[in-house]
Image (tube, grey):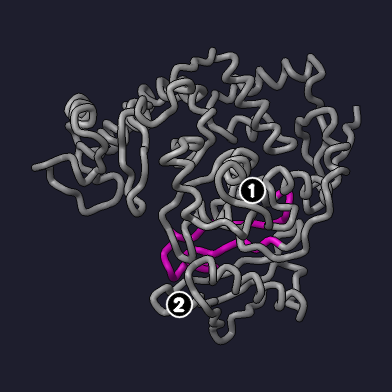
Amino acid sequence: MTLPVLPNPEARRLFLHRHALIEAPSGPATGADLAALIRRIGFVQVDSIATVERAHHMMLFSRRQTYRPAALKPLLERDRTLWEHWTHDASILPVETFPYWKHRFARDADRLHANWQRWFRDGYAAQFDTILNRIAAHGPVTSSDVGEGEARGKGGWWDWHPSKTALEWLWRTGQLAITRREGFQKVYDLTERVIPADILRRDVAFDDKVEWALASALGHLGYATPAELQAYWNAVPLEAAKGWCSAALARGEIIEVAVQGADGSVRKALARPDVFEDAKAVPAAAGRIRVLSPFDPALRDRKRAEFLFGFHYRIEVFVPEAQRRFGYYVFPLLEGDRLIGRLDAKAFRSERALRVKAFWPENGVRLTKLRAERLDAELHRIARFAGCDRVEYADGWARERC
């Protein structure tokens, strides 16, 4: 049977619309409105690199340019409408997802133990009760507050001191939660002091978790393979995802479609029966250029982004400088519903300057006068967001496509 085809322009717009990247990046970005935006996106990955601004702030600014970083803290630290935990990486999530993570806490307790015994120094398990008792009696701690007398490592995460490892273990397995951050340092407290009581008490059966994880992932993605659905939250096994898809197909709750890629090829995917109507209803994309975080939810699945947009992206933070093709931390650029290039830029806050080292256009993209004006306008908005008052362009910043 020939599957109905979702054309690439419609597939791109639907996917971007589900990620709040089609409409103009305007509107309120505080309080309940900001929480609703994060709920619509699904989650916002947290990352420490602040070449221009930290990843989670860049993600939210690219969707609502009234957003300012100070607006996020009350939702996490006072209102508790958001919380922080692990999807494929550390992320900010709507707090109503917490009950679904209880199964993950138990899973990770077994899975991490086997790996962490190989990766980290001995002795972290012996610190569990000590740390829990200390927090219960004296309140939240950071990794700097624990481990008195333990040798402090000079390396990366693999060289944590045992008490730091214990804190991370207790967080990943749900016994501790992040109550706030000081700078970028996590402050840990007992989970029952962080997660609202009604949500903390809520239990979810595993089958219900599978239903939620796969159905919600399909809602965020618009169409997907079973593997893409599983990877969205990374909350259930792939076999469970395949089983859910088979059952939902049999019930007529989802259908098979052929999604057209940027190169004209098609791939089979699963979608709701109304996917074609939804795709046609998506408004035309706002024409402005946006600077995206390398960790943007719309780009997290690099293979999917390459298929839909023809945009091959790999972050080069861990690539030796001499071997980098583009740069240490290069930002993808979205214009309308197309990824048009990548930008190497850095905010020098002490000098109040956003310095642009390079712009590389994608194949078939020219830096026309209009596009250059759009890019300059966006860079000035980004500069103000990053605490700078001017944009400086390096000689030869407008590159040819590599």
**Rendered position, 54 above or below 255:** below
Side of 318 relative to 43 (left or right): left
Location of residue 18 (image quadrant):
top right
Report which quarter residue 280 is drawn in: top right
Q: Reply yes or no: does residue 366 show up in magenta.
A: no
Q: In which quarter of the image is the N terminus?
A: top right
The amino acid type of the residue labelled 2 equals Arg
- Looking at the image, residue 377 sits to the left or right of residue 83; the answer is right
Kind of element beneath mark 1? loop
Residue bearing the label numbered 1: 298
Whether residue 19 is situated above or below residue 233 in the rendered picture: below
| Residue hosting label 2 | 352
Q: Main secondary structure of the magenta part?
A: loop
Q: Which residue is drawn at 65% across and 40% down?
A: 40
Residue 287, image x and y in percent? Answer: 77, 63
| Depth order, front residue of 67/366 | 67
Residue shown at 49%/17% (left/top)? 202
